[in-house]
Image: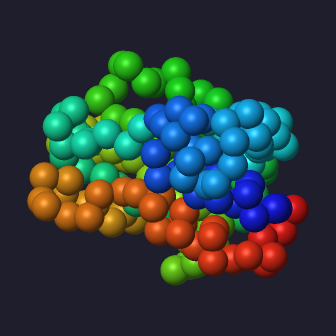
Amino acid sequence: MKESERKLLSELMKNSRRSDRELAKAIGTSQPTTTRLRNKLEKEGYIKEYTILPNFSKIGYTIMAMNFIKLGPKISAHEIEGFRKTHPDTMGKDPFGVVLIHRGIGLGYDSVIVSFHQNYASYDKFRNHVKNSMGTSITEVNAFLINLENNTLPPTFSFIARQILKSGNKTQK
């Protein structure tokens, strides 16, 4: 990744709402060059989507949950993909929202789901939904719950945006 592309990606992670003219000024290029760079980053998959990070407690979510899941040895990638595809059908019906579902490794677990909830009852309903949807595939579920009403550091990509600039030629294509 070229230096100008890293700079643009970093600036977009800090605030993707800015115009190409403002971004060009921030990264030291012309507006047409910035537009071409943005289009290239989108086409090559460096930019997946543009979104916002809301104040979750102001929009009704008081809990963020990091759900750690241990899956049975016989679960297939097909079963996991089935859960990923059926979960969006529950959106709007239940007061919870999932922002991340991934396989991984650590702490004795092999999957994680990050979700937002209006209250503990909503979280409990979500937890039951996950257990019922995955059935015997799940051998254990534990969670770390975060109270979003406390004055804590909100989610941000600003740190990663700064790291992109420091990574220099280490960034792999």
Q: Can residue 80 be seen here? A: no
Q: Position of residue 79 (x, y in %)?
A: 72, 42
Left or right of 21, for residue 46 = right
Q: Can residue 58 be seen here? A: yes
Q: Position of residue 65 (x, y in %)?
A: 34, 55
130 or 173: nearer the eye?
173
Tell me the quarter of the image containing the N terminus.
Answer: bottom right
Q: Is residue 64 above or below residue 38?
A: below
26 or 155: nearer the eye?
26
Left or right of 74, for residue 142 = left
146 or 1: nearer the eye?
1
Q: Is residue 149 above or below residue 48?
A: below
Q: Is residue 21 above or below residue 124?
A: above
Q: Position of residue 46 (x, y in %)?
A: 74, 48
Instruction: Name the residue: 38% across, 19% down.
Output: 92
Tell me the quarter of the image containing the C terminus.
Answer: bottom right
Occupied quadrant, residue 59: top left
Instruction: Name the residue: 69% across, 42% down.
Output: 30
**Image label count:** 0
Instruction: Name the residue: 52% across, 80% down.
Output: 107
Colour mode of the rendering: rainbow
Q: Position of residue 150 (x, y in %)?
A: 12, 59
Instruction: Name the residue: 46% across, 45% down.
Output: 15
